[in-house]
Image (tube, rainbow, N blue to C red):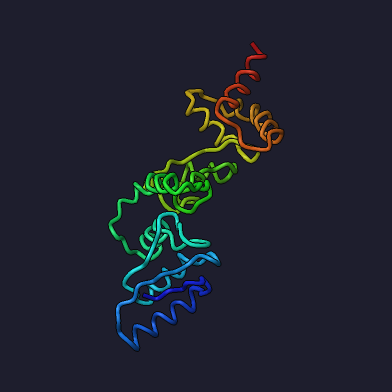
Amino acid sequence: RYCDTVGVLDPFNTYAKIKQIIEEVGIPVEMHTHNDFGMATANALAGAKAGADWIGVTVCGLGERAGNAALEEVVMALKHLCGIDLGFKTEMFREIAEYVSRAAHRELPSWKAIVGSNMFAHESGIHADGALKHPKTYEAFQPEEVGLTRQIVIGKHSGTAALRAKFAEFGIVLTKHQAEELLPEIRRAAVDLKRPLFEKELVHIYEDYFGKRE
């Protein structure tokens, strides 16, 4: 077991050290990495590429101090970056992360890699439009692969394509011209509130804006 207990290795040194151990000693190696410098997953992968047989992981990287290599990060990185599919039911990752977070009384950050709720949330007009037309432009893999769904978030950076797509979810068909008219109102509200808008707020703005014309 090769332990970076203090979490001070980088992927380059990790690869070199593990490769040297395997070449000179020829014994199986398990990687045990810590995340003090945010490199637990990277170091674990570097060790695997150098020939390590096992990687010690925890769900969401929960562990002492800054934590350890995260199960979901390691599995998905091996699959999509290294071409190694371990056969995990990755569509369960979000559910497992939520379960472990509740059991550990820890918050699951929305920005958490792989399983965070913001992983597939798009607000920027260009990003949202690209994600709708060609998901691979802005997404590393399909959200369903880890139990998530794509979210079009409407805020101050949104464009008409995202706005029309969002309202279509409500069963409201916006013409391009209507979206262009409504967008400044939406952006103004998002700026005033300093956050993206909730669905009820979007519908209220729509009804208020177009209702005045009737």
Q: Is residue 87 visible?
A: yes
Left or right of 100, for residue 111? right
Q: Is residue 119 visible?
A: no
Q: Quadrant of residue 214?
A: top right
Q: Residue at x 37, y 47 (%)?
A: 96
In this orientation, which residue lies closer to the viewer: 81 or 88? 88
Q: Residue furthest bottom?
A: 24
Q: Position of residue 187 (x, y in %)?
A: 67, 34
Examine the rendered structure and indicate whether residue 82 appears above or below residue 191.
below
Q: Residue furthest top?
A: 214
Left or right of 52, for residue 156? right
Q: Residue at x 59, y 27 (%)?
A: 202
The mark tally for this picture is: 0
Q: Position of residue 186 (x, y in %)?
A: 65, 30
Q: Quadrant of residue 198?
A: top right
Examine the rendered structure and indicate whether residue 26 appears above or below residue 136.
below
In this orientation, which residue lies closer to the viewer: 17 or 170? 17
Q: Position of residue 42 (x, y in %)?
A: 47, 67
In this orientation, which residue lies closer to the viewer: 16 or 182? 16
Q: Position of residue 99 (x, y in %)?
A: 39, 45
Q: Quadrant of residue 53?
A: bottom left
Q: Quadrant of the N terminus?
A: bottom left
